[in-house]
Image: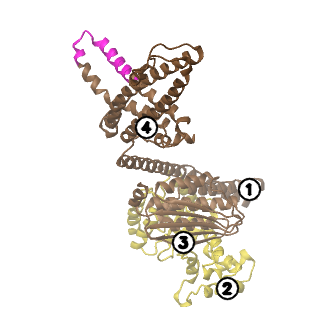
Amino acid sequence: MRIVLAEDSTLLREGLVMVLNRLGHEVVRQVADAPSLIRTVEEEAAEGEVDVVITDVRMPPTNTSDGLQAAHRIRERHPGMPVLVLSQYIAAAYARELFSEDSTGLGYLLKDRVGRIEDFARALETVAEGGTVIDPDVVKHLMGNAAADSRSSALESLTPRELEILELMAQGRANSEIERELYVSSATVAKHIGNIFDKLGLDPNAGNRRVRAVLAFLGR
Amino acid sequence: MRSMTTSMWRKLSRPLYAVSEGPWLALFALAMQPFLAFAALMLLLAVVGGLGSYSLTSPLILLLPFICVAMIPLFGLWYGYIERGRLWVLGFDGVASGHVRLPLRPFWTWIRVRYREPATWREVLATVIGGIFGLVSAVILILETATAAALAASLVTLGLVREEIQSNYLGPLAPLAPDVAGFTPDEWWKFALLLLLALIVFGYLNGLLAAISASASKALLAPRPEEIQRQIEGLTNSRARIMESFEGERRRIERDLHDGVQQELVNLSLRLGMIELDIKGLEQQGVDAAGAREQLTLAQEQARHALQTLRNTVRGIYPAVLEDHGLRAALEELANNCILPVDLSYCATTVLPQNIERTAYYAANEGIANALKHSTASRLGITAHSAEGTLHLEISDNGQGGADPAHGSGIAGLNERAEAMGGTVVVDSPAGGPTTLRVRLPLNQDERVNTLRF
């Protein structure tokens, strides 16, 4: 895959390039701030040179959530451009900011995750293929409170098993992977997922229910 | 100590004034005034003498009178300082300074400010009046001493030595009884009575004089309302400045941690990940790398743990989510991150001033930390709502209660913070629970000054 990488820490940027190369990807451009990211993607996309954009959240110029804003700008100009955001923030507000619009081909991964290179590689592929990835720790963080928060009635009505499956779905796992993880049959997984969709009140005709089920966490 | 806080006027009005400590305090205060005047004079002479001896032979001596006049406010300042102590002796305590708080350095700034302050010139006036009172006091004290000494000498002569007094020996009181020629030893009681009477009269006289001079000084030295106001504003500002600088420091530490250690740790875990891939490659070639893999897994776990710990630390120091997404998101994260279930209810104006958000966040943080540390709670609650220009924040738990807010330095710091913004912090923790931390913060910053106005 051809990747545009935005990360302001030189050390980490070089590390990421090393890992991505090792995984057989090509980092076509590296930048260190949000405006150059937007500009670079603009240039490279015109030549069809970008498959995925990987960006940090906190970058110059304001050192707040510039990376997320850049992701929005990029996807405004190039709808569906896969963007994988690397973040140090576990807070739901950042993930929510990213997933506020169309969530296909978007990923939100904690930086800690990058060290688990196989997870990272899988997340990258999922995002590149138009899937949605939310870091399991962020999801767990939300799930923890979802279970505690009596007011989130829709999620409350899920059984522990269903929450578990929803969590795996949030990690971008396919049904077959969930079967293997939980040692259950494909029929059981399908049944649970159907229940989750029903309980969360997701219209089967509106498409991409899987992603929307995951986003139900973030929408709280 | 109680007697010290009763003013001389009150003491004078008491029936047992004559046998209380009042006359002695009055005598002391009165005796002090001439000494003060004398000391001031000596000081002035020393300065003049010092300058004069340097410039005796030069035309600079012509400047001497001007220098002396220019130094008058300094004497006023000095006198004001001493006189406040004398007022305290006389029971007029708590006469605050009307001056602005100011460091002595830079010295010329200090001089400029002091010379312009009305408080300084009131002190100069108090010095002049104090000097006059000092003169009067000196005369009166000398007369009193002479009278008392004469009466006492007569008493001793008649009563103890048993000798006749041939002349009218009444001392300063002699003109009151011109036709009395002498006294016999049997008349000693007259002098005993006179002496007693004189002492009582002097006691009242001294008390009256001391009280009048003290009241005059107090009227001049006490700060004017606008001066009190200015001092309060100064304090409020300096408090706010301290808060500000703390905030800046926290932000800097957070940035350093984020830019430095955090990135390095991520990079470290990246490298560990690369090693993992290498080991996998070796294993595929049939090499036994179980030992290395075990060590690696431990190292990875450690790196992960370090990153998580660091993330928590960084959040405690300066929560980025608060800056980027506001109080609601930050409280939500706090609730999500808590090991106990937290019921969060947020209902506040969307845009809160930044310092209000910060204080509210630290309050919630502190409240939750305390609940986790000290109580047996199984469930926590945070509610935040704004009403009538005030943000109300409540952090409650269902624990055993009985918390002593005076114990925690955290609550004290919080209180300080809230007070600097005109807010309040109340800990309500009856034995048996539940414990509630209530924080009230006015949203309108102008109100802050109003609530502090006397």
Q: Quadrant of residue B136?
A: top left
Do labels 3 and 2 touch, CB within 8 Å? no
A84 with respect to B432 (left or right):
left
- Residue on which disc 3 sits: A127
Q: Amino acid at mark 1?
A: Arg
Q: What residue do we see at 48% from left, 62% from top?
A: B441
Q: Quadrant of the C terminus of chain B?
A: bottom left
Q: Are marks 2 and 1 on the same chain?
A: no
Query: Who comes first in sequence, dot 3 or dot 2?
Result: 3
Q: Are marks 4 and 1 on the same chain?
A: yes
Binning the other alpha carbons within 10 Å of mark 4 as few (below 14), some (14 to 19) or many (20 upward) gives many
Question: Residues under labels 2 and 4: Cα distance?
Answer: 96 Å
Q: What residue do we see at 57% from left, 52% from top?
A: B412
Q: Main secondary structure of the magenta part?
A: helix
Of helix, strand and loop, which one carries label 2? helix
**Picture coordinates of residue B189, whole percent (x, y):** 55, 25
Question: Residues under labels 2 and 1: Cα distance?
Answer: 36 Å
Q: Which mark is residue A190?
A: 2
- Residue on which disc 4 sits: B211
**Camera-side residue of B126 and B286:** B126
- Residue on which disc 1 sits: B293
Do labels 1 and 3 touch, CB within 8 Å? no
Q: Amino acid at mark 3?
A: Val
Over which residues does the magenta segment extend? Answer: B39-62
Q: Which chain is brown?
A: B
Query: In the figure, what tint was chain A given?
Result: yellow
Of helix, strand and loop, which one carries label 3? helix
Question: Residues under labels 4 and 1: Cα distance?
Answer: 90 Å
B380 with respect to B390 (left or right):
right
Query: Who comes first in sequence, dot 4 or dot 1?
Result: 4
